[in-house]
Image (cartoon, rainbow, N blue to C red):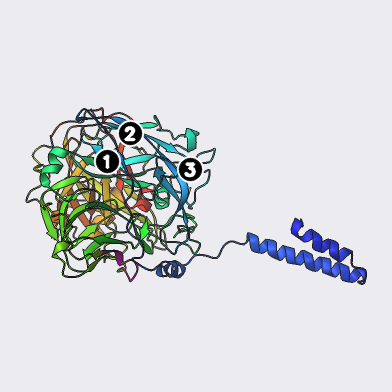
Amino acid sequence: MLTVAWHPLLCQILQLTHCSMRIKLRLVLLLLLLQLVALAAAQAPPSPVTKQILQKVAGSLQMYVDPLPQMPKIVGYSTQRGGTASVSLTIGMYQKTWKFHRDLPPTPVFVYGTSAAAATFPGPTIIARHGVPLSVTWENNLPDRHILPFDLTVPTANPVSGGVPTVVHLHGSVHPPQSDGSAFAWFTAGFREVGPKWTQATYSYPNVQPPGNLWYHDHALGLTRANLLAGLLGSYVIEKPSVDDPLQLPSGDEYDLHLIIADRSFNVDGSLFMNSTGNNPSIHPQWQPEYFGEAITVNGKAWPYLNVKRRKYRFRILNSSNARYFRLALSNNLPFDVIGSDSSYLSSPVKTPAIILAPAEIADVVIDFSQSTATSAELINDAPLPYPTGTVPGALDGKVMKFIILPCNQSDPPDNSTVPPKCVPYAGSTATGDVTKTRYITMYEYQSDAGTPTHLYINGLRFEDPATETPKSGTTELWHVINLTNDNHPLHIHLGMFQAIKVQELVDQATFKSCMTLQNDAVKCNVTAHAVGKVLPTADYEKTWKNVVKIEPGCMTTVVVAFKLVDTNQTYPFDASAEPGYVYHCHILDHEDNAMIRPLKLLP
């Protein structure tokens, strides 16, 4: 059918008086042919976006031209008569545009905020107070369609009425199961449609655990990788003055800063890139085993800079990437004084030249710029992708941000902050004497005939299969986690806290893997005869109660798992056995979505 734009031309042709009817017909046919060509061009699929194009876009962005922003803070308590009291917050999810770089067009994103105007990438930092409960109503104001592709051939929230399913998980928090953000508790805009495990719009966070760094992010079934890539993430801090203040760490908005690192790729028009074709398109049209972005963003800016004084700063560094590991170091060789890992302080600070952060891991560090002889320092990265045996980062993804170290100024106040000799007494409590249960957890990757990944399971089971990990609330367990894949997997557990106490290589892995593929039983496959290889060290800066533990490939990692409050040894002040329960999973989001995740059902 002819479009309106062609009607005037057609009329002019038919009104020609000096042309024969044959010529007029030829002109009309030519006009029709041109329209068909135009329609075909409009309907043709877009040219595939290549890695070279993505690298060209990222490479066109000059580094260190945008200042590092800090996200707005929301105080999650009120101060009354010298004490603190609970408050209720409402935080929404919105679509808007975000400037990731001075020279990049505005990028459509999904972001958290108290309003559309206030929403940011990442979302606002929530400051909670230990022992003061916080209620948050999470509102979905997202459009009917996603801004990124996803794959319905992996288990995915798929509302009948349209909309973008979301649900919020407070990562590292101790809270009731109804407030955990179950992947099946998703909801669309205005709660028009909800998942099978949805129960309430307002989540309750008791904030009863030790002080430390957490973060909140989307957790919708099969959409975690797309929703986080779009921007649904933010920081959350639990403060406890009786623990924090005596440490005399750098403090205040100028010297205590968050660094939320995330890799992203951008299309030529500035929009976020996510692959639209899978590595096995006949099986999964869109799903790929890992997403790696060409540009490194910090607090929503690509390769930003920060002016710093010659004094100590505290940085709470979160790796919020979908799949990328970072091995961070400073180009001027200044060390990190690590004071905490994930949501817990260490027993004592650990001085180290580099830190390895898996996806979802947090390092709480102090950097003393007064010790620098240089006037600047780059935060650099050399972690291979995939980790640990993949490609070494290049000129783009090997850089993170830049610190510009200002000259001394006599008007600057003195730096009275410290790196304390000790932090907290409970961090190293890994005694196994009170272990009530020992379990074997095995990670599998399944491949196509062409040798490319199709899906990943824990213990050979789907997410939908009944829970096999059913710890008793208030107890401690010992988990032997066996990794039969080639990747390092950041294992994350909801509610519980754990720490690795031994990492041992498997010998004659081919025989053991063959047996496990058939039997799926570590005891029957004589794991004790295979887990006798080299013992790998656990980094000293990870020796505390964590919510993410790196599981080395070809190894058995033994972790102590506590289903109780680790600082007081008390049970949870709520019914942790209620529905919909909890989960544990790999925090490489592409793995979690397909489907390296299992239910965790606590017993009373």
Which of the image's four quarters has the N terminus? Answer: bottom right
Looking at marks 2 and 3 on the same chain, the residue that comes earlier in the sequence is marked by 3
Q: Secondary structure at mark 1?
A: strand
> What residue sits 16% from the left and 67% below the top?
372
**Residue toward you, 504 or 234:** 234
Q: CA distance from mark 3 to mark 1?
A: 25 Å
Q: With 314 as the anchor, is 582 left or right in this view?
A: right
Q: Which mark's residue is nearer the viewer, 1 or 2?
A: 1
* Quarter holding residue 294: bottom left
Looking at marks 3 and 1 on the same chain, the residue that comes earlier in the sequence is marked by 1
- Membership of 64 in magenta stretch: no
Residue 179: which numbered mark, if any? Answer: 2
Residue range of the region highlighted in magenta in the rendering: 393-403
Which of the image's four quarters has the C terminus? Answer: top left
Residue 127: which numbered mark, if any? Answer: 1
Residue pointed to by mark 3:
142
